[in-house]
Each structure stands twice: as C-alpha cells, then as structure tokens.
Image (spheres, rainbow, N blue to C red):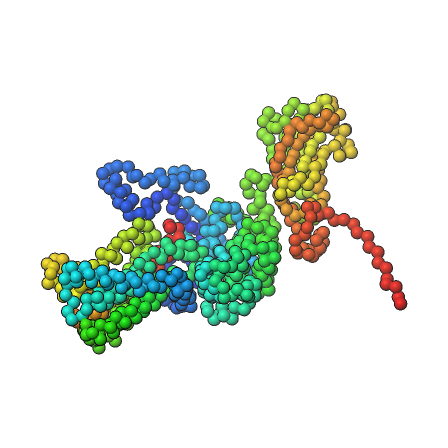
Amino acid sequence: MQEKDIILRVEKLSKQYRLGVIGTGTISHDLNRWWHKIRGKEDPYTRIGERNKRNTVGKSNYVWAIKDISFDVRKGEVLGIIGKNGAGKSTLLKILSKVTMPTQGIIRSKGRIASLLEVGTGFHPELTGKENIFLNGAILGMTKAEIKSKFEEIVEFAGVQRYVDTPVKRYSSGMKVRLAFAVAAHLEPEILVVDEVLAVGDAEFQKKAIGKMQDIAKGEGRTVLFVSHDMDAIQKLTQRTVVLADGEVIFDGDTDTAIQAYLNQGMDIKPYHEWESMETAPGNDFGRLKSAAIRNEKGELCNRFSVRDDMYVEVTYWDLNTEYHNTAIIHVVNERGQRLFASNEFNAPDWLEYHDKTNKGIVTATCKIPRHFLAEGQFSLLVAVGNYNPEIIHAVEDNLLSFEIFDDTTGDGVRGPYAGKWPGLMRPMLSWKIKKQPLDPK
Amino acid sequence: MDKPQKHTWLFEISPKSNLLDFKFKEIWQYRDLLMLFVRRDVVTLYKQTVLGPLWYLIQPLLTSVIFTLVFNGIADIQTGTVNAFLFNLAGITIWNYFAECLKATSDTFKKNENIFGKVYFPRVIMPLSITVSNLLKFGIQVLIFTAFYIFFAITGNAGSISPYLVLLPIIVFIMGMLGLGLGMIISSMVTKYRDLTFLVQFGIQLLMYVSAVMYPLAIVSKKLPSYVSWIVEFNPLARVIESFRYMVFQQGKFDIGFIFLTLGISIVVFLFGLIIFNKTERNFIDTV
C-alpha cells in the first residue's frame, strides 16, 4: 500500500461504555440516593442493568464496544465493513461521523467525511420537497450554493419533479425515501460513510441506488466506507472488507475471504455438525447419524459457493441395519422453505455392495451437487437416514446445515454478463442447439 | 506508526480536545444550515394552525391585562404617567424574548437526540438558530407593543421616547445572549438530570417576579427591606428591563455604564455556556 495514497487512517481506536448506574437520570433520585447514603443505608438504585450483553456479569462496569481497531483506507477505495449485531459496527460508524468521541485512539483524515447513517435526517413534514432538499443537504454538510447547483439533478434522480412544491407529509413513504437518498447521493465529500441505506425503496429504485453507489465508487473515484448486512451488495461494491467481531477486527482483506470469515462465525451457519457419541446421536438400533458436512472441491469445509462451484454434501452414520438396506437422504430447502429436491444414497451404482445386511459399520456417503444447478440464495439441508421397502426413517434432522450460493457477472455463468435479477428456482446450464437459415433472396 | 509524519492530515478525531476551542470557524462554515433552521422554524410556525402565530399576540396581551389587574389594580403599584397596561406590556415584551430563548434552548440535546445521533454538525447551530428565529417572534410582539404605544401616546399616557432608544439592539442582544448562554448550560445538565426541565419552567416563572417585569425598579428598595431588595437590584435582567422601559417611556433609572457591563456579563455567560455545551456535545449521545 502506497503511503501517500492513504486518505483515512484509524489507529488503535477504542470506545468504552460504562454500564449500570451512571447517574440515576433525575435529581430527585440522586438526592434520594445521597440521603440513603448518609444514613448508612443501601443504595436504592443499584443492581439496575448490572448484566451486560457480553455476559461478564458483575465483573466490571465497563465494556469495550470497540477495542484497538486499526486500518488504513486508500484514496478511491470502497471498503466494506461487516459484522454481526453488537460487533461494534455502529460504534465505529458513530465515531467516524463524529457523533460521539472515541475513548482512546485516533482517526486521521485527509478529506471531509460525510456520513449517511440514515436517510432523511431532519426531514420536516410541513416543509415542501424543495425546502427539505435544502435543509437536509445543509444538515449533511453541503452549502446552499452546492445544493442549488445540484438541485435539478437531485429532483430528477428522486423522480419527484411534479411534487417539489408539495409538503413532504403528502408524499408516499417511497417518495420520501427516494428524495432523501437522492440528496445524500449527491453529497460530494472526499469520504462517504454509508450504512445500509440501500435497503430502501422498491426494486427499481434499489437498482438505481446500487448503480449510483457504483458510480460514486468507481466513476467518481471517491472513497466509500460501506457498512451492510447485505452480502450481495458488499460483494458487488467492494474489493476489500473489514470484518468486526466483539469489537475487534478479525479479518481485513479481500471481500470473498472476508464474507467467508463472517459467515463462518457462530454455530448456526457452520457447514459441519457432529454428534458426540452414538448414544446421544439421533437414530435407533438400525441407524444413527454421526456427522454431516458441506465441503468444496478441495475437501475443505465451506458453506459459501459460487454457482460455478461443485459442492459436496457428506453424511456419516452408524449403519447398524442387518434387516434392510440403509440409505442416507438429503433434502435441499431454499430460503422460502421450498423443498427443491431430495436425493438418496441408493442412487450410487455400488450402493448394495456396502449394504449387504451383514456388516455393521460407519458409512460416509458423499453427494455431489454439481455447478450450474442451484440458483443463488440461502439453502438449508435436511439430513436423514432410513430404508425403503418398507419405508422406515431412523433419524431425521431438518435444517441441520445451511449454505449460501452466490452469482456474479463475470460472463461465464448461466446469466452471462447480465447483472439484473435472474428468475427461477434453479439455475441449470442447459445445452442449446442453433440453426439459422438465410432469408430467401429476392 | 511510521517514523517521520509526512502526511498532511486535514483533521483528526481523538479523545483530546481543547476546552477553549470555540470552533467559531466551523460555525461560520455552517451558517447556511443556521439560516435554513431559522427558515424552517418560521415557515412551520406560519404553516401551523391559525392559533399558532396568533398565540404570540394573545399571550403577552392577556398576561399584561392580568398583571395590570393584580399588580396595579389590587396591589396598587404606581407606574407614573405611563399607562399601567402599556408599562406591563413593555416589560413582558422584552422579558419574553429572554424567557423564550432560555426555554427553547434548554432542551436542545434531548429534543434533537435523534438527529444528533445520526449526523454531525456543530451542535451549537441548533440553539443559535432558536435564538435567531425567536427574534422574529419578538419582532411581532414589538409591533403589537408599538401599536398600543401609539394609541396611548395619542391619549398622552405613554411618556416620551428617549434618545437612548438607539441602544435597543444592544438590549435585545444582551437578552438573547443571556437566554442562549443559560439555555446551553441547562441543556447540558438536562442530559444528566432529566427532571431539570420541570425546574426550568418553574425557575423562569420565579425569575420573572424578581426581574422587575411588572413594577418599576425604584419601588423595590422603597417597599422591601434591603436584605430582600438586593435580589432585584443586583439582578442584571431587572436592570435591562428597566433600561428598556426608560428608552420608550423616559421614566425610571438608566445607566449607560451598566448597560455595557451587562453586555460584558452576557458575553461571558454565552462563552461559558458554549464551553460546557461543546464539552457535552462530544459524548452526550452515550448517556441520553
């Protein structure tokens, strides 16, 4: 990283919050406390809010919302910031936008910072669209002259030409949001801090908003810090991403790896599950589940795949069946709860060789879900073990694992270079045959 | 991190701050915002119900009527050659500007918690804009006062205008600065003690009675023992109000030196308020 390219430097930034009782908030309570104190009685207002969200009960009244965060941002870079709720994103944003001050550390900047933590801050319902554009623009740090020069552009972008002189209270909520975003999008600071504002408006406007963000970042060469929960937007807009967890930077680097690091935190999105012992595992005397995993081509655990990747679902179970032929079963369910397909181990041509009713053992059955098959989105996996004829399910675990599939517009996928919404529950790469006949010459 | 600091940083955000940094330059940069806030206040006032703007006429008039009945009618306070109603109206008009500024600025942080939590601009823009837009309400009330003044002047019950009236802008400035300065101090305290707002309402009421709004300053030392009367006599507000009445009626006490002394006091109060306000602004969002 070239030193001179750095426009923003965050150094060992920390913010401490004090929990519990700071002051009681009212004079009368404070006086009452003082009165209890001089009579040697117990403070009537302690024990309020002693427990903090990080489960360090009673230990200390102080929590670090963020601790020793450092990173540099280059000029013209779009930096993504992701993290779960409580990871310290909002605190970092608040400090960057000067709403609150850090406890330790320093932020140095070579450019004006404008922050967009909310669209439409300071909108007044009684004022007209035009008046609100000026007021909101000024709140965000523009001068009157700047707003005036961009006024036409803002109105056009928001698509509210007909209603500029109507009080905002008569606007639909969509119009209000569009107008607010339009003002914000036309800010011209060197550094723009954006918080999830893309999640507003209808689909058409969202496309416009993402496009505008891309323009700001790429075309206009401005520096953007983009905070979001929307992995798609992060992926589309940024090359580099910082991942926060419990107030610290756990990853800083290319966006794909960052998203992976983000998704791999916590239990519910682990691409792997294993039961501790045969006794506690789900199942019966015929079969019990042992573990399940989702792996990529290299055999690594993974729960985020491109539509171009092959995916391997691995089910391991105790095969205890000496009466029937056991089979592993998987179902793939999409985020809307639609069961896309089911697949069984007995599709393997050599299945019966492993289930000949004589040997008990631990079976590992791996199913390949091919590339160019599932559409982008989030999926959950049902894993079961059972036998057919007669049909008996020994163990079934719904929603055991989950994974995500994403698509991009590099041009070699099903969607080609098309960036818009691609319809369909599945995304198979099918073969096409083409014939072309010349027009009859006159 | 790197040894020689060859970067030229535009600004820094750090826990350190200079207590005496008033950030006047930054306030000047945001002057457009100040004017837009004033405009918003004025426009929304105008756009509200019929009674909204009318209230600014009814309130001083009714108060003057009541004061006249109680203080001049019942308590029999003499106002010299000046009509008692006009006398009270003068006091209330100038007092209201101070009281309105104080009341409206004293909950700046609480009232704007939402917007302050989302975007940065010099917070002091908010109380400043209130002080400026209150000037307009004051203007309306001055117009009413002028109308009554002309009416009573015709009947010969209004005294005469003093040449010191040219100092009126200074009087108004003092009232604005005092209201703003005290308001900023209180608004900073309100972030810690929420019930202070009730105290403010009550306090303003009490303060009015010791500020010579509805009686001449001279009467205090005559009617009250000195261990009580000093409260009024050394109250800068009382002196300012008395001075205002002298300007329009040429009756009572007037001391030009005192005006400039009060001007100095009001500027000190304002700067002191600004220091406390700026200190609170840095972290208040964590405590509200």
The residue lying toward the viewer, choosing from A187 and B160, is: B160
Residue at 28% x, 55% y: name it: B201
Residue at 32% x, 57% y: name it: B106
- The reply to whether residue B223 is visible in this rendering is yes
Image position of A256 (left or right of B176): right
Please determine whether, in this image, residue B52 is positioned above or below residue A299. Answer: below
Residue B218: horizontal and vertical position, in percent? 14, 66
The residue lying toward the viewer, choosing from A296 and A351, is: A351
Quadrant assignment, res B84 = bottom left
Please determine whether, in this image, residue A347 is positioned above or below residue A435. Answer: above
Residue A1: horizontal and vertical position, in percent? 56, 59
Residue B128: horizontal and vertical position, in percent? 35, 64
Please determine whether, in this image, residue A52 is positioned above or below residue B64. Answer: above
Residue at 24% x, 37% y: name it: A40
Residue farthest to the right, as pictured: A442
Residue farthest to the bottom, as pictured: B163
